[in-house]
Amino acid sequence: MENWLINIMNEFGYWGILLLIALENVFPPIPSEIILTFGGFMTHSSDLNIVGVILAATVGSVLGAVILYGVGLQLDVERMEKIVDRWGHILRLTKKDIHKADAWFDKYGPWTVFFCRFIPLIRSLISIPAGMSNMNFGLFLVLTTFGTLIWNIALVNLGAYFGASWEVIVGYMDVYSKIIYAVLALLFVSVVILYVRKRRQNS
């Protein structure tokens, strides 16, 4: 995949970066770390410049986020209630659980959308619950753009700084991703355990 990404960026420049980052948001397995750091390196080996790479990556990222926000709008609370009515007994979910989650996102959604832009995988998927909770689109757009811009500035500049050794950053980002995934897995298990215990106490 790495060679494919690099070939597209070499051939299409800014437009290639924009397209790949948009796809990365919709299909998270595509690694943005490679796109951004190699984009930074390309500022030494092509006509691309750092500002242009950052802007192209940011536009692509926001475009992808808006697409997933739209997906979330189609999965609103009413539709989730219908899913729970049909499958809730298997998933051990109730309509009350859905409303609690929606209320939580209404309260903490803005901060969640912003800070999740720095977490691999989650940085893309967070746009879906934002849409599901009907988060104010203008606010979503501002926070997504701001968080994405910080992420892009950091990685593109690191790629430019390390130049031909840009893959060193990818290696460090891979370690960072694994640590984040491990922490998220532990948090998920903890939440499940607490949820099961609470259900048992209430039953």
Image: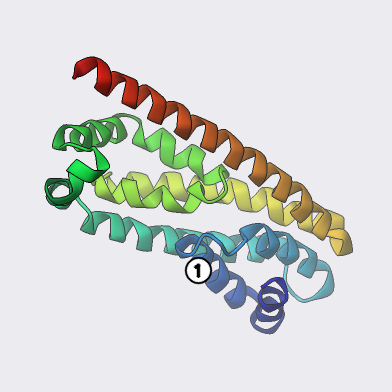
Q: Nearer the viewer, residue 46 or 195?
A: 195
Q: Quadrant of residue 183?
A: top right
Instruction: Count up the numbered dots.
Output: 1
Outermost residue toward the bottom in this view? 11
> Looking at the rendering, in which quadrant would you find the N terminus?
bottom right
Q: Residue at x 15, y 53 (%)?
A: 79
> Looking at the rendering, in which quadrant would you find the C terminus?
top left
- Residue 57 lies, in percent from the top left, at 58, 63
Q: How is the image coloured?
A: rainbow
Q: Residue at x 46, y 26 (%)?
A: 190
Residue 138 visible in the displayed image: no
Q: Residue at x 58, y 42 (%)?
A: 181
Q: Nearer the viewer, residue 97 or 43?
A: 97
- Residue 152 lies, in percent from the top left, at 62, 53
- 146 relative to 107 in the view: left or right: right
- Residue 191 lies, in percent from the top left, at 41, 28
**Residue named by callout 1:** 23
Picture layout, residue 162 above or below residue 147 = below
Query: Callout 1: 10 Å neighbours few (<14), some, many (20+)?
Result: many
Q: Quadrant of residue 101?
A: top left
- Residue 45 lies, in percent from the top left, at 83, 73
Q: Nearer the viewer, residue 138 or 34?
A: 34
Picture layout, residue 4 above or below residue 26 = below
- The amino acid marked with disc number 1 is Leu
Q: Secondary structure at mark 1?
A: helix
- 48 relative to 189 in the view: left or right: right
Q: Residue at x 66, y 38 (%)?
A: 179
- 80 relative to 111 in the view: left or right: left
Residue 177 visible in the displayed image: yes
